[in-house]
Image (cartoon, grey):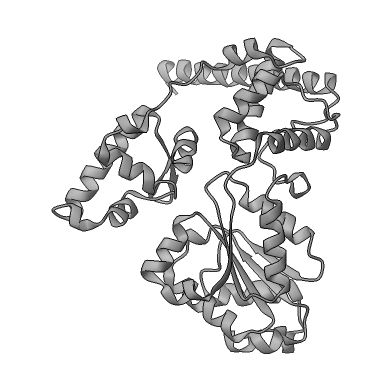
Amino acid sequence: MNTRELKLYIREQTYNVNSKMIYTVIAMNLIDWYTKLGWHQNPFTFEILPHAMVGYKTQAQDMITALRSGQKIILITGPTGSGKTTFLKWLIQNMPDRDFIFLGKPPETPEELIFILNSKYKPFFWSKIESLYQIPGFLAKKKPLVIICDEAHETDLSTLEWIRVISDQTPNLQLVFSALPVFENKLKTKLETLRKRIAARTELLSISKEEMIELLRKRIIYAGGTDTLPFTNDVIDHMFNQSGGFPREIIRIANNLINKAAELDKDLITSDILEKQQQEPEKINTDDIPERQRKILEVLLQPMTTYEIVEQLGLENFKSKTHGLRAINNILKRLLELGYVERARKNRNYIYTISPRLQTIFIKA
């Protein structure tokens, strides 16, 4: 190692040590602040807490009724952050008369489904499921089984089709698909057979201000606190207006606010902390957004790759697929600069989605 490399190495190690010290101090400040409020942890993480679910009483009753009446395929939709996964986990806890398998996404192959069923029931070697054709007989003498497939909008059409066939042939099996709202449009244009099999539908949108307050209280009690909220009324109004009533966004905003309050060592989160935490975001008039940008934002209520956006908008709008990809990439670059969209890497592609702030506006529209 030469002198220059040694200096760079020492500088890097010093930076790492200093960073760790800073993070340790911040963590200790947070722990002290939680202790002062009687909390044993942060109430506002993205941990899924089915017992803390609020709102959606009508939707919950509709789902329970549909399952108990034996409906074969049920669809639940809602925008990102509306609480679909929490809702489904709550459903599992409140229907002891059913067996449930919750899948983060539908199985990609028949072999994967067979493995899942064998893992759940742990049959003897000679009675294990070996093929899809054995599933109806295998489940016939068991308690009714509900397979919940989350993130169904990300699933290939061929996968959805063979899952539908298995459902048709298995009397003791019910399917619940959970997806973004565009899923049903996808089925309507590309898989009408499955769409016609959906016997019950329910939609989650957002919760009311009163339900938001109940959500905050339930999470604080779960963390060891009382039902007293550390937010003033004007801050609560701000939280509801900024979140649009989407549970995930409510939790994100609450987390940011308590972090700022801990930094300032304030027990009560007031409007002055709110002002220090962030300036009021610029109000967006969607009428001012250019038409091409608006069309992309509308389709990005479902996370998509650039290629999927081009397909959704229609290749007939471009000279060629290459022209379409280039044009959409340029618009996405601008939307990223404006903070209108967000992206995350998935394998070799970027997945784009509309930012929470605009999501609220477009969902309400």
- Number of numbered discs overlaid on the protein picture: 0
Residue 227: give x, y in percent of width and height.
Answer: 84, 30
- Residue at 78%, 23% in the rendered image: 31
Answer yes or no: is residue 131 visible: no
Would you say 7 lies left or right of 47 here? left
Along the line of sight, the residue nearer the viewer: 8 or 35: 35
Image quadrant assignment for residue 251:
top right
Image quadrant assignment for residue 246:
top right
- Residue at 63%, 34% in the rendered image: 250
Would you say 243 lies left or right of 63 here? left
Residue 343: give x, y in percent of width and height.
Answer: 42, 40
Q: Quadrant of the N terminus?
A: top left
Residue 4: give x, y in percent of width and height.
Answer: 41, 16
- Residue at 39%, 50% in the rendered image: 304
Q: Is residue 268 above or below residue 314?
A: above
Q: Is residue 215 above or below residue 173?
A: above
Residue 18: give x, y in percent of width and height.
Answer: 61, 16
Image quadrant assignment for residue 263:
top right
Q: Quadrant of the C terminus?
A: top left
- Residue at 41%, 63% in the rendered image: 186
Work out which residue is located at the far left of the displayed protein and give it: 319
Answer yes or no: is residue 51 visible: yes
Q: Is residue 15 above or below residue 102?
A: above
Q: Is residue 187 above or below residue 43?
A: below
